[in-house]
Amino acid sequence: MAVAAQSASEISKKKSSSGSTLLRVGRYTAIRLLTLFVTVVIGVYLTILIANMGGYVDTIMKSQITERITQAAAANPTFRSMTPEQRQQTVQTQIANEENRMGLNTPVVIRNFTYLANALTLNLGRAINMTSDSGSKEVRLIILERLPATLLLMGTSELSLFFISLLLALTLSRRYGSFWDKLVILLSPTSTPPAWFYGIFLILLFAAVFKLLPFGGMIDSPPPTNPVDFALNVLKHLILPASALFISQFFLSIYNWRTFFLIYSSEDYVEMAKAKGLPPRDIERRYILRPTLPTIITQFALLLITVWTGAIVTETVFQWPGLGRTFYRAIGFFDTPVIVGLTIIYAYLLAITVFLLDFVYALVDPRVKVGGNQ
Amino acid sequence: MNTLRNTFKEILRYPSAIAGGAVILLLIAVSIYAVITIPYNDAIRLWRGGEDVWFDSPKFAPPSWINLFLSKKEPVSFAVNTANGTMSKTVTAGAQNTSTINMSYSFDFQYDEYPQEVSIYFTSKYVKKQPFASVQWVTPDGRKIRIDDIALDPQRTLRFSQDQRLIQRLNGEDPMKALFEDPKTHAILKGKYQVQILGVTFEQGSDINAEFVLYGQVAGLAGTDQNRRDLMVALLWGAPIALAFGLLASIGTLVLTMIIAAIGTWYGGWMDDLIQRITEINLVLPQLAILIMVGTFYSHSIWAILGVTILLNIFTGGIKSYRAIFVQVKESMYIEAARAYGASNKRIIFLYLIPRMIPLLIPGLVSSVPSFVFLESTLAVLGLGDPVLPTWGKIIDDAFSNGALYKGYYYWILEPAALLMITGLGFSLLGFALDRIFNPRLRDI
């Protein structure tokens, strides 16, 4: 909705006679791209700073390395034949090598800028502690491996939520004050608890008490070999987390859309159309949906970004192997490259969406002119 | 004063507002009760306490009121002590400084399940010669079962089901079954049981005290967790913490947002631009992830998390909508008048601009409380809850990590979840009604 407000301010007053359209659009595009890029740079740099904790994470990681290597040395039989000095020296070299590999020897400030430069060029690099299921340390592969799971879960729940609530809201806005309308208003506070909260109840009911659906995960182990069985099995695991995400936003989403449509249906031109005796379907399509299209598109675009990032807690509660859970695990492993990798993708997606939306507005709404207020 | 009364009258016209207000008042009452009956330090000591504090309650016991809904009644846990007189004790002096101490306790056992365990904790006082105790069990049908005869150290625990001599005497049968069932029918024998302890001391001033504990399958009004802790402590103390966290976060966020929006609008220019840019940067930041990072790397303390939450929530969409309103207010006549008589910028911002917004602020304030309460429990469920404070989220986290859902300890999750739900609903209902009262545009819709 915030973006919609922004677009409203960009509604042009009158076409300025000086300067060609191309120049205006070009200049606007350049300024917009620059500010968005600076925003992304600062946002990602802040995330890197927090993820490195001003260098304190280094201390944690160094002590972890020392502990691990000393323990490995104590357990290693080939070390027993060495003299204590030799052993000490070998351990020290190993620790130094390991610190070098993780890049702990470069100062944090410099390392932060390296992270930033790599992140901005989408050179996601290698994870420090995490590995993908196929054994790779490439952040790109770790993310790509988890992406389908997140897209499946978030795509199913968020897309169905979006379209179902939009359609229901449109229907409700036409008969507002009816029983169903009041019911939706009454139930809209049910959207206060987050999705994992409903998830717990769903697990309790359908997995623990009725034993109908699995507690969590994405696939049985061992997975079925037959592709049809495989799909059905994934579907079985998908039902609970997807419904948790769906239920937790359902009524508020309908309520918000309904209120939004109601505001637009009390506009004078809608009254005029009604007075002219146009059929309700036409009024809905031409007089309500058309002017609200920018907002609907904005919401849809923002939704696509959420689909991409996954749901940290819901995925953790349901042990769904998606990006949200990977993010959470990356934080637990102090794995800065993975954290930064996930953040930069999110930041870029958001910036690109915000940038493109300006142009989309101009396409769907003739009142909006790109860079019109400059 | 009149407007306040009118507002209040209007609030009473909304049933949802009354319900929400009642819930909030109830929560405040519970919070006050919790803080008074269990002072802060006691709450921490109880919640952090291990076996030494909670040795006399069972593990994983559901609340005792579930018996009301069960056809097979579960035994309720209890503990009696000779030191505080709940268990009878008579001392008879004998020859040569010896004394005989008779301790006994009778209880009515009308349940359909076996208890988890029966134990006696002896504490005795002596210098050289250890006192001696023999324990006997009397069943309702008059059988007498010898449990054990033991010499007493200063602290001695007799756990019936782990007592090897008793198990041998019972031919390897589980003591809980042997003690509580009819030997012929193998059904639980209901009726009056008695435990009798005969103690002998051999010194002047030597004394024995015993605590008899029957670890039932259910305990207390709230049940217990994996550390035998009574969940009531955390359920009660969760209320003031949830309220404090929710209200502080919500007030802090809204007030700061408003002040910053007012300053930005009033001065305009680069200040306004800066605020807009910060808002855009904040949009790029992964909020929950940053909170998790702060929780993992920096501090588990709930107050640190509170501060970061407020910081992250200042520069969000809200600042833009406030700005939109301030831009209008800025142009109004009374501001112009204030400027004309030479009021300072500070005076105009804090005494003229911001007070105008307060009515608009209240609904948002009330309805944003639940999201912060749930945020705290969300972090707790991720294992980032405050390690010291007992909160509702912590209970859910404990329950989850101990597999409460798999093992069927539903009470453990349902109790805090119900409280969270009630809190959330209370504030949302009230906020919803307030929104309609303070924003009359919404009333027709």
Image (cartoon, rainbow, N blue to C red):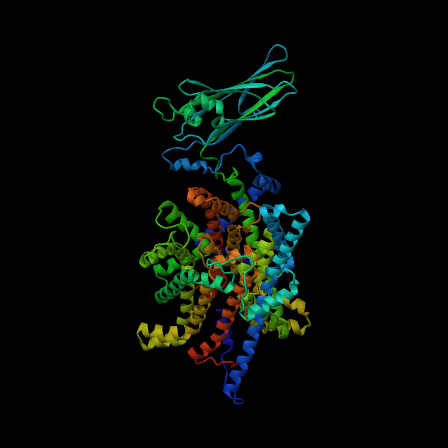
Q: Residue furthest front?
A: A81
Q: Quadrant of residue B443?
A: bottom left
Q: Quadrant of residue A301?
A: bottom left
Q: Is residue B170 above or below residue A146?
A: above
Q: Residue furthest top?
A: B95
Q: Which quadrant holds the N terminus of chain B?
A: bottom right
Instruction: From the viewer's side, name the closer residue of B260 and A242.
Output: A242
Residue B112: % across, % down:
38, 30
Q: Is residue B45 visible?
A: yes
Q: Is residue B366 visible?
A: no
Q: Which quadrant holds the C terminus of chain B?
A: bottom left
Instruction: From the viewer's side, name the closer residue of A285 and B220.
Output: B220
Q: Is residue B236 above or below residue A198?
A: above
The residue that appears at 60% across and 64% down in the rendered structure is A46
Q: Is residue A109 above or below residue B373?
A: below
Asked whether, in this view, residue A271 is left or right of residue A362, the answer is: left
Residue A120: % across, % down:
56, 70
Instruction: From the viewer's side, name the closer residue of A178 and B274.
Output: B274
The residue that appears at 45% across and 71% down in the rendered structure is A298
Asked whether, in this view, residue B431 is left or right of residue A251, the answer is: right
Residue B347: % across, % down:
66, 67
Residue A113: % across, % down:
62, 67
Number of numbered labels in the structure image: 0
